[in-house]
Amino acid sequence: MRIHVLVFALLPVLAAGCAHITPAGASGPDVLLSFPDRLNPGEQVVAFELNIRNGQILTVNKVPYDWLISTLVEASQSEMSGRPNHGASAFQDMTPLKRFLTVHKDGQAFDVTGSLVVTTNFTDMTTNFFKKSDFILEQIAPTRDVVHQT
């Protein structure tokens, strides 16, 4: 019985220690990220890579069907890469990579770079590199949320 009382007494303390209120405007805004639509006729996307500095991936909003995705989210940076599980899963338009991530920007030093690997014949591959100004970053409305830390 004493253990149950102790557990119930500690739960509110643990919950308060693992969560904090993030006031709106405390740091940079959250944005929806899209790769630019620069595919040439006949090209198919067979891989992508994304590197975020001074920001982090909050949400993966969608994943291309039958793709393997690898994600690393650290305190001040995030990385993501993806490739199709089968060649038939390569895509010929950029819809799967439009608004596919929600990213938190940690102030003015936020930066994002990435690349797309494309092919027309699955033998010859071309890597296209992108910088921050190439990506489509759509600001979303700020909210007052409880953020859980692990």
Image: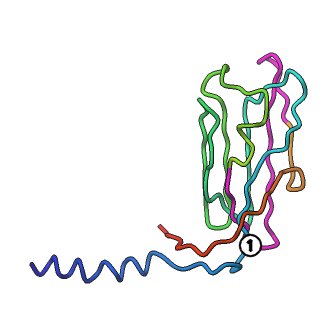
Residue 51 place in picture, x, y as percent:
74, 53
Q: Nearer the viewer, residue 86 or 37?
A: 37
Name the dominant secondary structure of the magenta segment. Answer: strand
The local secondary structure at tag 1 comes to loop
Residue 108 within the magenta-colored segment of the rendering: yes
* Residue in view at x 86 percent, y 38 percent: 128
Residue at the image position 62 percent from the left and 22 percent from the top: 86
Q: Residue at x 61, y 31 (%)?
A: 65
Residue 133 is drawn in which quadrant? Answer: bottom right
Percent coordinates x, y for residue 81 in the rendering: 67, 42
Residue 14, image x and y in percent? 36, 78
Residue 78 picture quarter? bottom right
Q: Is residue 104 magenta?
A: yes
Q: Quickly name the residue at label 1.
A: 28
Report the front residue among 96 and 51: 96
User: Which segment is the magenta one?
Assistant: 101-127
The amino acid marked with disc number 1 is Gly
